[in-house]
Image: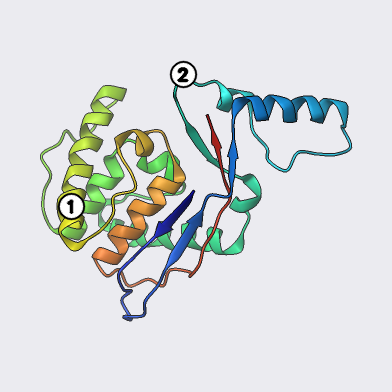
Amino acid sequence: MNTLFNPYISANFAFITVFLSVFSLYSVSDLQEEGKNAINAPMNPSTVDIHPEDTLLEENEERTMIDPNSKEDPKFKELIKVLIDWINDVLVEERIIVKQLEEDLYDGQVLQKLLEKLADRKLNVAEVTQSEIGQKQKLQTVLEAVHDLLRPHGWTIKWNVDSIHGKNLISILHLLVALAMHFRAPIRLPEHVSVQVVVVR
């Protein structure tokens, strides 16, 4: 399963394609087998570090996680840094500082401020929401506004309320790259970024 960023053009009008590729597909039984093998062969470490709580799923639930080794890839780190710096530059007057994309964007607050600043329009949402339901309602409103902007220009939507609120970094990156490209952000995104993603079913 491959996920592909398909941004239009950067501020310097050079075409960029950023890839996030899914290389691995694990089932819970595969992970359990890998756990048994790890116990039986302690000198042969697992290539993917998965915590047990990440494999506790509801029926038919699926969860994706970025392989920790991929998080160390220089291009992946650069992509995250460029996007964080861009968000912080856009929101400097709001005195908002983003340090970690998953933790700072999942509730919709920063995304709301970012979209309002970029699109020069006010969204009709509560300023602060503490409950999960309130956060998801706010996020739904913000993402609908994003979709209204991007869909007419041919963007494929690769995120939703649950993936953003669930702190899915791949979804958050797809969203931010789409916004950066749509608004022709004065940034240079690294090309051909690929990460290994583990899908737990």
Q: Label 1: which residue?
A: 116
Residue 63, position as x, y percentages in the image: 49, 33
Residue at 87% x, 26% y: name it.
Answer: 40
Q: Is residue 141 above or below residue 97?
A: above
Residues packed near mark 1 inside 10 Å, few (<14), some (14 to 19) or many (20 plus): some
Disc on res. 135: none
Contact (Cβ within 8 Å) of mark 2 with mark 1:
no
Residue at 36% x, 59% y: name it.
Answer: 177
Residue 66, position as x, y percentages in the image: 56, 44
Q: Nearer the viewer, residue 157 or 92?
A: 157
Q: What amino acid type should be assigned to the residue bearing mark 1?
A: Glu
Q: Nearer the viewer, residue 85 or 149?
A: 149
Q: Label 2: which residue?
A: 58
Residue at 20% x, 49% y: name it.
Answer: 147
Q: Quadrant of residue 13?
A: bottom left
Q: What amino acid type should be assigned to the residue bearing mark 2?
A: Glu
